[in-house]
Image (cartoon, rainbow, N blue to C red):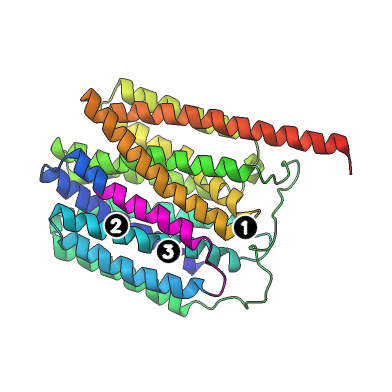
Amino acid sequence: MKIYICPALMDALVFFVTFAVMYRAGEQGMSIMRCAWIAGLFQLTYMLTSLAVGFLLSRRNTRIILLTSIVLCTLCGVTCLMAKEFIMILVIFGCMGIWMALFFNAFQTFMRAESAPGDLGRSIGLYTLAWSMGYGTGIFSSGIIYRLGFIALSVLTILAGVTMLVIMLMHQSRPSGAPSADECVEQGSGKAPPVDPLYVLVGWIMIFTAMFIQRPIHNFFPVIYAKAGISPFMTGLPLFLQLALQAVGGFAMIRWRHLLYRRTPIGLAHGGAAVIALIMWLWPSLPICFLGISLIGAYAGFVFFCCVYYSSNSGRRSLNIGVNEFLVGLGSFAGLFVSEWFMRRTGNDASMYLVVAVALLVSLAAQLAIASLAIASRFRRVVAGP
């Protein structure tokens, strides 16, 4: 259980630093384009590193990769808090993307190896709960502590890094020869549909979409409202609430695994999130955006659990997760620049929410098409017989 504190602290560290840097950029009048490049380079290095490391990870090398990435992410975080020039911030964020990619890809391989057969759903639920709460806590605490200055921000960043190191060094790993969730396919109970490898593709589309819609909101919302004079506490609160709902939703999926490998939950989740985004686009007042951004967390909790579960439950799992994390970066990068382009061309920051709604609906159509192919393929196998 203690090892799940590490992804929580890693996301807390990275997004604690990210929120502080982005809010400061808004205070200094930095353009949306420059902010997009800072966040975009982070995602670019994250996705390229994820794709490469997916070919290299094994149970034997994850521990040293985790320890190294924790040290380097902590150093980058403190350095970024000191930096004020655009180019320096850009370079440090790019490096942080590399170390964060190494950490999260390695941790998911480590997590599967440390889970007994049949415990995959529970492990992914705990993982979703941990990193989502860490992400939200990082944003929220940065909003509260921001006014205390660089020293307070740096001390908390270092404290998070040291705690992760202590946890990893003290953890007693399972014997390398013991069976684990990494070698087993976990089937649902009762009348749940069987595992279908085509759902790995559904999961990849899900995670691309989730990051496409989440990253611009999380990076541009602090900039927009800092320029409007809204306090960092009030700016960070809806982002925290979204991630808290995401954490709870992902954890609840441990009991709701019967929703996996089905089309109806996919339609309800994406359709509901699209309606919320359209309401924020039509009426972009602070109370409506506050509520809408928070509620999208329920959609995100379902999606993030599903995409990790589908990739971890069949095929070459470390490679599947490497592609997952690559799509985290690609979706974030695309979402940032597509949203920035529409915001700039329309002169309206609320255009970001229209981009979110359209992305959700296009993604839903693609996922339903693949899910329908899976059903048709399963039906043909049943008809053909053994």
213, 283: nearer the viewer? 213
Q: Badge 2, how many Cα within 10 Å: few under 14, some, many 20+?
A: many
Would residue 277 appear left or right of 143 to someone viewing this image?
right
217, 287: nearer the viewer? 217
Instruction: Locate residue 64: give its quadrant.
Output: bottom left
Is 113 covered by the magenta stretch? Answer: no
For the point 24% across and 26% down, the residue is: 345
Which residue range is magenta in the image?
38-60
User: Can residue 254 be seen in this snapshot?
Assistant: no
- Badge count: 3
- Indicate the secondary structure of the residue bearing disc 2: helix
From this view, report whether residue 26 is shown above or below residue 117.
above
At label 1, the amino acid type is Arg
- The image shows residue 96 at horizontal and vertical percentages of 31, 61
- Alpha-carbon distance for marks 1 and 3? 18 Å
At label 3, the amino acid type is Leu
Earlier-in-chain disc, 1 versus 3 = 3
Q: Badge 1, how many Cα within 10 Å: few under 14, some, many 20+?
A: some
- Indicate the secondary structure of the residue bearing disc 1: loop
- Residue with the most extreme top position: 282
- Alpha-carbon distance for marks 1 and 2? 28 Å
- Alpha-carbon distance for marks 3 and 2? 13 Å
From this view, report whether residue 240 is shown above or below residue 60.
above
Earlier-in-chain disc, 1 versus 2 = 2
Mark 3, residue position: 102
Would residue 66 appear left or right of 138 to someone viewing this image?
right
Mark 1, residue position: 316
- The image shows residue 333 at horizontal and vertical percentages of 35, 44
User: Can residue 362 be seen in this snapshot?
Assistant: yes
Mark 2, residue position: 94
Would residue 219 appear left or right of 312 to someone viewing this image?
left
For the point 68% across and 63% down, the residue is: 183
